[in-house]
Image (tube, rainbow, N blue to C red):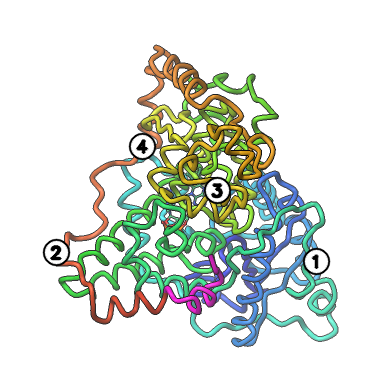
């Protein structure tokens, strides 16, 4: 009786898709994606996310069409869409992956549960990451993560697709109100679509993983921190993981297999892949925090930090940050790159948040909303945990205050990055590269450049503002209230340190041979273009 309804959300793939695989064993399947206007109105939603989803849906639809089906795209709030589908042709069960999303998706899922209860429909939800719903204690998490990553992939066999009876009401649903992927237009209120962002779709996800495993990972450890080398050296898998074009388990398993096949002397390559595996583990570790405590999207993880920055928010400083005119070239160049590409490496993301949280003394929530729209790979669980961690409100992490001048000296010593993204900096001599505001007026005249108009002046005195910020934070940190609340945060959220990524493997760096050749091949311009990024 009926059919199995598969609801695609941030899992836009066919392979290793538990909802599709399990449902297909029960009966004919009907695959839907629902473009929910309420979701796309949220302050963390951006046009670039929507476009990436659209591209990924095209890729998923093409695959399902090869198998004789399709993905139907419906527009509307989920309970209304369920109503429409149900009235036209009742379904047996609803299947979807568990989602650790924002407060809006949490509330929407409660409404979907209520709808299912009212209609006597079972809703089956399946984990897609190493994230555990209703985790009893953090001590149990690592085992669950490992078990998930070790399990066989949930790849469906040949699919049987549901078809409406010709002439039935559901048949008009299929051809009429059910939209094709091509009909899905971006609602007009969404802003920002970077010119050079990565493009969505399963094929690009696989090409990106392949080029990383077979070559680019050789430069991972040495290249991940500088914004000059990171675009190539990092895996660039984040948007594909965030929107589910590839599963985390596929990435972990392929990486482990690749590691096992590396020759003994490939130590550099091995070190890169081990470091990468540790980031994959962090992905789930961070999402687990939001899963276990959804409120950290809005409120401090450690409540002892409440009131620290809420009442002092300075809109002019926030505008300077978001418009890339703080006056610190490294910060402003990062904002320019982010606006153009939708991506920044970890170190530069951390620096942006640190500058926002300390010298600019901005609360993490508006900064996080802005960055969520800038990051193509916006993943709520990682994002809000990192925002709080870099702003010093978790109560369990060391305070990290990144000095943007030192970051430039360390990661862009010759100014290639800042000059690439800030055209005015091209005229600034090396001597004043890190602190252009110190250029004497006579030199500015000779260069035809004015600090304060062509190049922004620092919006605050970095040294003084950072000192005041640290003082404000430390006063809280060492207060009796904060000390007393720390253990509860540790129990709930801290990582348990005894985790190992893989066996220890020994050998010497490989400078020639097939691995080095592969590395060269995949960093070529053509390979980068194929992966959908060219910077
Ligand atoms: C303030 C801030 C906000 C962030 N917001 C996001 C976000 O919304 N979405 C997101 O995917 N990452 C986020 N990160 C983490 C990290 O910066 C990105 O995952 C990484 O830069 C993506 O590029 P990549 O895929 O090439 O990373 P790689 O270095 O190749 O790492 C591979 C994968 O591991 C995971 N990962 C890497 N670093 C981290 C980390 N520090 N914490 C958790 N998981 C990690 C990601 O899934 C990433 O795709 C944030 C970091 C900071 C400091």
As drawn, the label of residue 334 is 3
Residue density around tag 4, few if under 14, some if 14–19, many if 20 or more, within 10 Å: some
Image location of residue 105, percent across then percent down: 64, 48
The N terminus: image quadrant: bottom right
Which residues lie in the magenta part? Answer: 523-535
Of the two numbered discs 1 and 3 on the same chain, state the one appearing first in sequence. Answer: 1
Is 439 drawn above or below residue 221 in the view shown? above
Q: Residue at x 51, y 44 (%)?
A: 330
Residue identifier under label 2:
506
Task: Please say if the residues under marks 4 and 3 sit with CB atoms less than 8 Å apart.
Answer: no
Residue 1 visible in the snapshot: no
Q: Which residue is mark 4?
A: 494
Label 1 sits on residue: 87
Q: Secondary structure at mark 1?
A: helix
Is the CB atom of the residue marked by disc 2 within 8 angstroms of ligand 1's nearest atom? Answer: no
Element type where label 2 sits in the image: loop
Residue 493: image tag: none
Spatial CA span between label 2 and label 1: 62 Å
Determine the image quadrant of residue 253: bottom left
Mark nearest the camera among 4 and 3 is: 3
Q: Nearer the viewer, mark 1 or mark 4?
A: 4
Viewer-nearest of discs 2 and 1: 2
Is residue 329 highlighted in magenta? no
Q: Nearer the N terminus, badge 1 or badge 4?
A: 1
Of residue 134 and residue 467, the one placed in the foreground of this image is: 467
What residue is drawn where x is 35% and y is 47%? 141
Tell me the CA gap for discs 4 and 3. Answer: 30 Å
Instruction: Give the alpha-carbon distance from disc 1 to disc 3, as whole Å.
Output: 51 Å
């Amino acid at each position: 009786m009926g059919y199995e309804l598969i609801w695609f959300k941030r899992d836009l793939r066919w392979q290793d898709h538990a909802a599709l695989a399990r449902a297909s064993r029960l009966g004919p399947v009907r695959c839907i994606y629902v473009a929910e206007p309420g979701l796309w109105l949220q302050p963390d939603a951006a046009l670039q996310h929507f476009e990436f989803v659209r591209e990924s849906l095209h890729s998923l639809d093409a695959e399902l069409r090869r198998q004789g089906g399709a993905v139907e795209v419906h527009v509307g709030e989920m309970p209304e869409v369920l109503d429409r589908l149900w009235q036209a042709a009742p379904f047996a069960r609803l299947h979807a992956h568990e989602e650790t999303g924002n407060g809006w998706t949490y509330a929407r899922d409660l409404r979907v549960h209520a709808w299912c209860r009212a209609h006597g429909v079972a809703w089956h939800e399946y984990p897609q990451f190493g994230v555990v719903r209703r985790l009893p204690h953090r001590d149990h998490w690592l085992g669950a993560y490992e078990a998930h990553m070790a399990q066989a992939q949930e790849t469906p066999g040949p699919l049987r697709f549901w078809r409406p009876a010709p002439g039935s009401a559901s048949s008009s649903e299929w051809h009429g109100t059910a939209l094709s992927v091509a009909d899905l237009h971006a609602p007009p209120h969404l802003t920002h679509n970077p010119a050079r962002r990565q493009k969505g779709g399963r094929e690009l996800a696989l090409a990106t993983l392949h080029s990383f495993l077979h070559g680019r990972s050789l430069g991972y450890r040495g290249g991940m921190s500088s914004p000059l080398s990171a675009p190539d050296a990092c895996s660039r898998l984040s948007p594909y993981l965030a929107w589910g074009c590839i599963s985390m388990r596929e990435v972990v398993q392929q990486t482990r297999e690749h590691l096992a096949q590396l020759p003994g002397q490939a130590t550099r390559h091995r070190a890169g892949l081990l470091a990468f595996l540790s980031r994959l583990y962090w992905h789930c570790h961070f999402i687990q925090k939001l899963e276990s405590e959804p409120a950290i999207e809005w409120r401090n993880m450690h409540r002892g930090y409440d009131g620290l920055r809420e009442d002092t928010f300075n809109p002019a400083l926030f505008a300077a940050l978001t418009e890339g005119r703080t006056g610190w070239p490294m910060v402003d160049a990062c904002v320019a790159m982010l606006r153009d590409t939708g991506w920044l490496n970890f170190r530069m993301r951390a620096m942006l948040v640190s500058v926002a949280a300390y010298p600019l003394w901005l609360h993490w929530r508006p900064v996080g909303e802005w960055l969520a729209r800038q990051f193509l790979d916006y993943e709520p669980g990682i994002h809000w945990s990192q925002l709080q961690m870099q702003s010093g409100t978790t109560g369990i992490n060391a305070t990290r205050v990144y000095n943007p001048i030192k970051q430039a000296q360390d990661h862009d010593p010759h100014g290639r990055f800042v000059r690439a993204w800030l055209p005015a900096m091209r005229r600034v001599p090396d001597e004043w590269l890190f602190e252009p505001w110190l250029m004497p007026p006579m030199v500015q005249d000779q260069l035809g450049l004015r600090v304060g108009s062509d190049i922004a002046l620092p919006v605050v005195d970095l040294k003084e503002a950072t000192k005041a910020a640290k003082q404000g934070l430390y006063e809280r940190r060492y207060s009796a209230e904060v000390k007393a609340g720390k253990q509860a945060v540790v129990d709930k959220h801290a990582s348990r340190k005894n985790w190992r990524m893989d066996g220890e493997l020994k050998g010497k760096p490989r400078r020639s041979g097939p691995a080095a050749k592969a590395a060269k091949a995949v960093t070529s311009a053509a390979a980068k273009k194929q992966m959908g990024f060219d910077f």
